[in-house]
Image (cartoon, grey):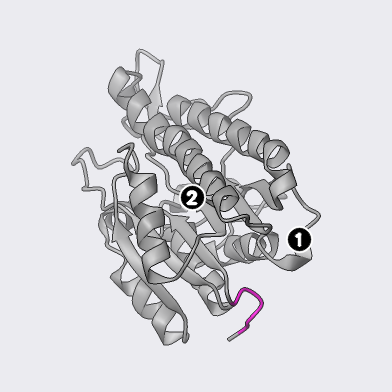
Amino acid sequence: MQTGLRSHVALVTGANHGIGAATAKTLAARGAAVVLAYLRIPDPGDRHGPKLYRTNRESGAEKVLEAIKGLGGSGVAIEADLTSSDTPGRLFDAAEAASGPVDILINNASGWVADTFSPTPKDRWGHQQKRVSAETIDSQFGVDARSSALLIAEFARRHAARAGNWGRIVGLTSGGQAGFPNEVSYGAAKAALENYTMSAAFELAALGITANIVQPPVTDTGWVTEELRQHMAGRADHIASPDEVAEVIAFLVSDEAQLITGNRIHLR
């Protein structure tokens, strides 16, 4: 077990599977106490996406927490709806009670839904999509944009109140500034998350807080199909594992990355 993050406390959202789970385990292996925030999302029954991905989204965080403790790390798992305005305060309170003040915030959770403006809502693979609606917009923005902004605000408020001088914020994106066909609300919400994070980098620098965005390549969190693997074959980008992405995040929250802030880091 490494100890570079010992004495630090990390809050990771969407930590029950995929990149969030891998990040939580990686940070714990480096000595951080980790708060795993997650929400089980039931399979809507429309069969969009591989079964493994839908199963992962339905899962709790028990196995992740068990793995962390197996590494000799410490953590707590809290199921919470990030679209509720009182959730940030509740998560930070729980973290402080269990481990101490949060000084690492990983905004990873997503309210992902595939929606489209197209009157024939199917993607290039023939998968059924939803048409853009108030429901699809609110579902996506409520988690990826609104909750991330509220978590950053709560992080900064508590950091300043205790006169903190070290902090790390990392947001996860898939891009979206130039549009995101077939997942239009997802792309728009991620673009908003990027903007909030860049603002935090400038506004919170004087408090010793860095803020960066990580854009992973296609990452196999359970949704990668054989069709997609064939499509990606021979391209410069590769299909990453969640653990590979987690290593980059772990570097960004380390002391060695203290000069890196306000960056959108595009992985290949």
Left or right of residue 180, residue 48 in this image: left
- Reply yes or no: does residue 137 show up in magenta: no
Mark 2 to mark 1 CA distance (whole Å): 19 Å
Residue sitting at x 51%, y 60% = 102
- Where residue 77 sits in the image (x, y, percent)? 33, 65
Residue found farthest to the left? 45
Q: Which residue is nearer to you in this view: 130 or 164? A: 164
Q: Which residue is nearer to you in this view: 264 or 174? A: 264
Tag 2 residue: 108
- Where residue 23 sits in the image (x, y, percent)? 52, 64
- Which label belongs to residue 266? none
Tag 1 residue: 257
Type of amino acid under label 2: Asn
Residue 192 in view in this figure: yes
Residue 267 in view in this figure: no
Q: Nearer the viewer, mark 2 or mark 1?
A: 1
Q: Dot 2, crowdedness within 10 Å: few (<14), some or many (≥20)?
A: many
Q: Where 63 sits versus 143, above or below?
A: below
Q: Earlier in the sequence, mark 2 or mark 1?
A: 2
Residue found farthest to the top? 119
Which image quadrant for residue 35? bottom left
Which SS does the magenta portion mostly show?
A: loop
- Where residue 63 sits in the image (x, y, percent)? 32, 73
Residue sitting at x 81%, y 55% = 259
Residues shaded magenta: 2-6
Residue sitting at x 73%, y 45% = 205
